[in-house]
Image (tube, rainbow, N blue to C red):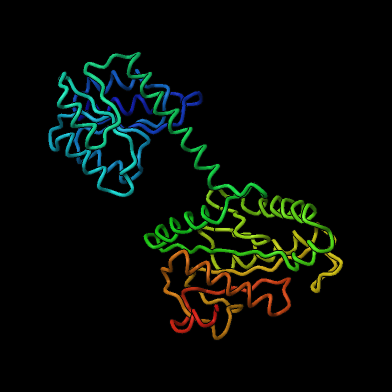
Amino acid sequence: MHELAACAARSGGLAVTDKRHFSILLVDDDATVVRALARILDEFTPMRFASSGTDALRLSRESAPDLVLLDVELPDINGFDLCRMFKSEVALADVPIMFMTSHDSLQMETLGLQIGAVDFISKPPHAPLVAARVRTHHRMKEMSETLTQAISMDYLTGTANRSRLLQALNQECLRARRSGSPFALLLMSIDALDVYRRQYGEHAQDDCLRAVADRLRTLARRPADLLAHCELGTFGLLLPETSAAGALALSQRAIREIDAMNIANENSPSAPHVTLTVGIASCDRIHVAAEISNAPSLHTHAMPDDLMRAAKHAVDTAQGRGGHQAVIVNVSTWRSAGIDAVLQ
């Protein structure tokens, strides 16, 4: 165990500027094998080490690796059983597992593939073969990420689409439930977009949507902030770690930013230029003075669909007041009755 820790420390001290970001977890209680694999796979980072199945599960639950190199024979848990444990957990089920074994057995390899392993390598590891196979899995991950990004993109504006926003919102709900931290969802709707389209045409409308998206994108500065085009002329912005007051301030800034673009919309009832109305669903325990009175309620740990409906209710309320403004709903203080009736 001390030898493995020393190996991890030495690997962690290497320069990583030219390394490929591909998280590998090496699971083996043989320090000689671990050192050999660490040298062979030095081009990848981060690399972590576990000498037991228990440690491997703990490390993976803390941060799921991109690839696990797993010894079949471990001191506490059989490698095949550990693989089954990975596949039974939602967060780890898709992590590719490459078995390592000194046994040349067709039955063992067949079993490993049947329970979900992606590959087998022999021990002692043959450097060129191991490096080639790991590079293949790295390329597969890059291709998968590219495809996922393409599927989750709104091609008109270059932002995320509604499906991607709901996925991120679900993840944020789960994270906030564990940490208790605030977050907010903004729905930002372009006022009188139908008026704009009738006067200037669909091509001009598309240009307007792209320009507004580009300006709103400047507000989503943090890596976890996510801007999405949810439906024609309506953008969603997910803001993790953001209080109600912070979400309201950002919404007001968004309104000013779109005003400053001065895109003509002469027949709009709110202003002679393109304007924005913002509805905010805030998961924040602090009561906000701008909260809608007589609004229905949601549980503090609301689900994504609930938050979307809450933000939509806020948008509708703001538009009912003439638009070109922001309205906030503090989800944690809503009352429980009547949401369906209000949102019909």
Image-quadrant location for residue 57: top left
Q: x, y percentage for residue 277?
A: 69, 68
Image-quadrant location for residue 204: bottom right
Image-quadrant location for residue 41: top left
Q: Residue at x 54, y 86 (%)?
A: 294
Q: Residue at x 62, y 70 (%)?
A: 279
Query: For the N terminus, which image quadrant?
Result: top left
Q: Residue at x 23, y 39 (%)?
A: 55
Q: Is 315 displayed left or right of 82 in the figure?
A: right
Q: Is 79 displayed left or right of 269 in the figure?
A: left
* Depicted 104 relative to depicted 60: above or below: above
Looking at the image, can residue 75 be seen?
Answer: yes
Looking at the image, can residue 5 be seen?
Answer: no
Q: Work out whether residue 33 or residue 277 is closer to the camera in this orientation and state it.
A: 277
- Exactly how many numbered labels are in the figure? 0
Q: Residue at x 48, y 54 (%)?
A: 168
Query: For the C terminus, which image quadrant?
Result: bottom right
Q: x, y percentage for residue 215?
A: 72, 53
Q: x, y percentage for residue 157?
A: 67, 49
Q: Is 224 displayed left or right of 290 in the figure?
A: left
> Furthest residue to the bottom?
294
* Depicted 56 relative to depicted 169: above or below: above
Q: Work out whether residue 194 or residue 70 is closer to the camera in this orientation and state it.
A: 194
Q: Work out whether residue 155 or residue 85 is closer to the camera in this orientation and state it.
A: 155
